[in-house]
Amino acid sequence: MGIKDQFSKYRKQIRLFWIVFAGGIGAFALFILLLSWGVFGALPGFDELENPQNSLATQLISSDGELLGRYYRENRTNATYDEIPQHLIEGLVATEDVRFYNHSGIDGRSLARVLFKTIILRDEDSGGGSTITQQLAKNLYGRPSANNLFALGTIKFKEWVTSTKLERQYTKDEIITMYLNTVEYVYDAHGVKTAAKTFFNKNVDSLTLEESAVLVGMVKNPSLYNPVRFPERTQERRNVVLYQMREAGYISTAQYDSVKQIPLDITRFKRQDHTSGEATYFREYLRLWLADWAENNPKPDGSTWNIYRDGLKVYTTIDSRMQQYAEDATAEWMTQLQSDFDKHWASNKYDPWNYPYKGRTKPELIDQAMKQSERYRLAKKAGKNADEIQKEFNTPIETTLFSWKAPNRELDTLISPYDSIKYVKKTLHPGFMAVDPASGQIKAWVGGVDMRHYQLDHVNPGTKRQVGSTFKPFVYTAAIADKGFSPCQEVPNLPVTFEKGSRWGLLQPWTPKNSDGKYGDMLTLSMGLGKSVNTITAYLLREVGIQPVIDLAHSMGIESELPFQPSICLGVSDISVFEMTSAYTAFVNGGVAVRPVFVTRIEDKNGNIIADFPVKRVEVMREEVASVMLTMLQYVVNYGTGNRLRRAQYGGLTGEVAGKTGTTQENTDGWFMGLVPQLVCGTWVGADDPVVHFRSTALGQGANMALPIYGLFMRKVYNDPSLGISPSATFSKYKGTPTIELDCSKYKTSQQDVYEDLLEGYN
């Protein structure tokens, strides 16, 4: 073959090479062009890159700056770059993208390594080729599933293009921050800030080196390196991160050798959800209120605020310290009270719902509850007959029940569904609320024993129970304000009859009785209120009338319907803890009722205030009347039914304390309203169904069921000087010219011996 023929042959080969090369370049350029045009799926535009959208949880902040909880679809709270510890950033870079600061979104060396080792040599341990920026692109805009090599290549190319755009749009520090805020950990913890709170119960800026290494190690596979389920595997992964940090020069060999020996500590792990943590019942009430607020207060563009995605900050009035004290005091007393209740009924052959107490029983209670259960509904849906369903309900199964004495208050036991219903129905529940009377701010809210097992909130304005004698102060207030009665004035302790007819709204005459069955002689108003004597309250109601009492109660904050019946004076009305606590603030505020406030302001995710909530005050009585009532309510604590507060086992409170006990018929509800100069508190205790109660008034009275919670709470509050609430504080005294006589020496008093007998009987 001649030289000319050889040259012609090579020229064809060279031309073929350049055709193939140019075709490849052209095809690649066309592919990139089609990619940018969105033929293979849309790429994020400028606006999306400028404002990437993540679901941000709404945060609830306490009045003392603590995080109470969140509302979310994704439990995410963004961290700023300044909040993120340097060793967390260095650990991430060393482990995930060691050349992060040297590339522009795509790391050619890593790609070459992946191509050669992973694809050609089949080395699955060679590591990935995705940079932190590429991973951010995937986190922000998702990665669709790929069922073939072309689809996978298209997805990767799109991530590369997006990565280079992100690198042009943001600084390296911003990319690191955005990435750490988009990592999805286990237990619904989205972002490193939430993860720090979940696994270590601390703010992200307080993480130690070894804790940061744990969170970085989890990035690769959060489920595989779950420190709660796989502590040994997680510790090994943590140490790999520390090794990579040493290799990258971020920590010394000495640091590495020291820190890798530290045991993995997950004792502070606390899953962040809606039914755990502090103030769970309050948070649920606030969630519903906030959703309603969002519906009625749109954004400037007319759209609706989303409390699960928009990253709002809701500044609540709850004080985390007082909330903890309230929950601790409730748990302390309810543990004892529930034990007493269980023993009280264990010694009896009857259950509370079928005990023949004055002919008032409800034997159908358990069967009704069974038929209302989800298990029963599913059994009926499956076509089971009555006998099959009853057999299912009588067969023991593994169940978790609430128990004050069990670890984490959850008892894992073998019990039939039918017996578990009985167990649940015998549970006593508390409701406790504390309000700052000056500002109206709610400082503590305990709606029940445990939100995980019992969702009914016993503080919620919609949850109403008979209030018993805690209603009597409204009658006394009306009598003093409208008729000029004095606390020293004596009235007859004799049965009072209300005639039938329109005046009292009765079809038959009604004569209330004293709970102790004692009558006769004369008692001062202070004695009558202090000992909660029914005949004295009835006497005052006859003098003042029903409507003035109803009007006064409504003006003070009682929004519940009050019946036009004389029995109103003994507290037959159903009213919530929320309303009662609100109403009692007027006694401390010199006659001015303050409507409870639970949110001070709401901010958007950028810190702009979008709503604030001023205090609402209403003058409902003269200052002198309020001062007189406070004096009488102090009498209740010093000498009357609230005297237990002075005993050490019930708080041992000193200083000025006012209050009122309440016990309803058959001991179904126990109440105590407690007042000090800086706090007004309402406490209720009872079972969800009124048929479940103590048989004994000694055990079922408000002084035994509810009062101790208040006493224990106040003792904890007094012992915390940071709260600024002191037992030496005094109620404001009326400084005007008195029109109500307080000097009892000016009244004929021949009943001291009678009073001493009454006092001995109660104490």
Image: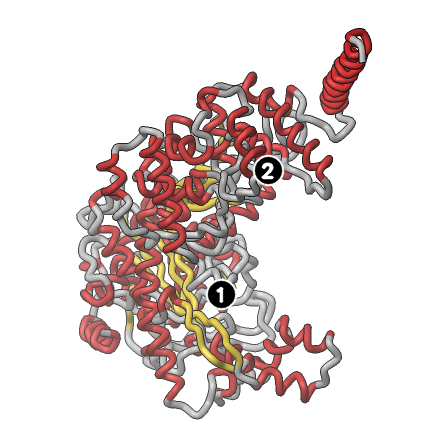
Q: Position of residue 121 (x, y in %)?
A: 56, 40
Q: Can residue 307 be spotted in the picture?
A: no
* Looking at the image, residue 417 lies above or below residue 549: below
Q: Position of residue 478 (x, y in %)?
A: 42, 55
Q: Position of residue 464 (x, y in %)?
A: 51, 62
Taking 421 as reference, is 440 left or right?
left
Please tell me how crowded label 2 is: few (under 14), some (14-19), or many (20+) other residues with Cα within 10 Å. Answer: few
- Amino acid under label 1? His
> In this view of the protein, which residue sits in the foreground, 519 or 34?
34
Q: Can residue 374 be spotted in the picture?
A: yes
> In this view of the protein, which residue sits in the foreground, 262 or 731?
262
* Looking at the image, residue 741 lies above or below residue 55: below
Residue 332 placement: quadrant? bottom left
The residue located at (31%, 34%) in the rendering is 246
Q: Disc 1, disc 2: CB below 8 Å?
A: no
* Looking at the image, residue 85 lies above or below residue 672: above
> In this view of the protein, which residue sits in the foreground, 360 or 197?
197
The residue located at (44%, 52%) in the rendering is 226
Q: Residue furthest top?
A: 4
- Amino acid under label 2? Ile
* Looking at the image, residue 233 lies above or below residue 124: below
Taking 606 as reference, is 430 left or right?
left
The residue located at (46%, 30%) in the rendering is 97
Taking 729 as reference, is 483 left or right?
right
Query: Which residue position is annotated with label 2?
Result: 120
Q: Position of residue 573 (x, y in %)?
A: 51, 64
In the picture, the disc for residue 453 is 1
Please tell me how crowded label 1 is: few (under 14), some (14-19), or many (20+) other residues with Cα within 10 Å. Answer: some
- Name the element at disc 1: loop
Q: Residue furthest bottom?
A: 349
